[in-house]
Amino acid sequence: MPALGVNIDHVATVRQARLTYEPDPVWAAVLSELGGADGITLHLREDRRHIQDHDLYTMKKTVQVKLNLEMAAEEEMTRIALDVRPDQVSLVPEKREELTTEGGLDVIANFDRVKQCVVQLQNAGIEVSLFIDPDREQIAASKNAGVHAVEIHTGRYADATSAGDQQTEYETLVNVSEFTIEQGLKLHMGHGLTYRNVSRIASIPHVSELNIGHSIISRAVLVGMEQAVREMKALVSI
């Protein structure tokens, strides 16, 4: 049964729309824990479009479950991570013009920069995961970078518009999942997962963590954060 990491970025997105103080993502994190979340994930972007530095620092003092910081492998973000000391850092690609993270980190093309960041974080006792596409070469490069885990991008599966395409993408995920375990890496998955499509992914052998944000926050607008997390937790626990 995979752990459920709840990404609370979009709570901050609503707040930043008015540049005010509510809704507070820290409150959302507390309610997520009450709903059964095993971890809280937040992405501190270089453009600070949603999560702000003070959110991260307050979250570190407040969250009782695993704190997972998503960030680009850049010097500024690394300095902040080394200061805050989250339980885990997930290195992700980042472009200022994107609506959300588009595709996985190209570990092969950015190997030296990624490796340097990984070493700095791990020397400080922080576990590191790389958010990558379901590609064996990227998994192998991640292994060579020395990380303890990879988070496989599930976007193509989530975005598939036909049953046949979704099945094809699902089979790809199963295939690379087996390869990930063979490489001795922990297997995480995330991106685009919803209440409708998550159960098949949760049932893939050896998946230890799922990170889900937008769908939970969307549901929370209607039923509340604690209930939305509780419903998702039930689906990934089947």
Image (cartoon, helix red, strand yellow):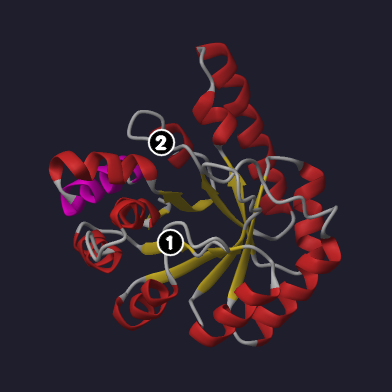
Calculate the distance from the C-alpha at mark 2 to the C-alpha at mark 1.
17 Å
N-term mark: 2 or 1:
1
Give the quadrant of the C terminus: top left
Q: Give the residue displayed 29% in from the left and 54% down from the top.
A: 18
Say what secondary structure mark 2 lies in: helix
Q: Residues within 10 Å of mark 2 (few under 14, many from 20)?
A: some
Vertical relation: 190 (above or below) 164? below
Q: Residue 81 location, x and y as percent? A: 56, 78
Residue 132 highlighted magenta (yes or no): no
Q: Residue 22 location, x and y as percent? A: 22, 61
Q: Disc 2 marks which residue? A: 198
| Viewer-closest of 7 and 184 | 7
Vertical relation: 68 (above or below) 229? below
Q: Residues within 10 Å of mark 1 (few under 14, many from 20)?
A: many
Q: Residue 232 location, x and y as percent? A: 29, 44
Specify whether 217 is left or right of 152. left
Q: Give the residue displayed 34% in from the left and 71% down from the top.
A: 65
Three-letter amino acid code at disc 1? Answer: Thr
| Viewer-closest of 80 and 64 | 80
| Viewer-closest of 94 and 4 | 94
Specify the principal SS of the magenta part. helix
Q: Which of the labelled discs sits on residue 41, or is there none?
A: 1
Specify whether 57 is left or right of 160. left
Query: Which stretch is magenta?
Result: 225-236
Three-letter amino acid code at disc 2? Answer: Val
Q: Residue 54 location, x and y as percent? A: 38, 77
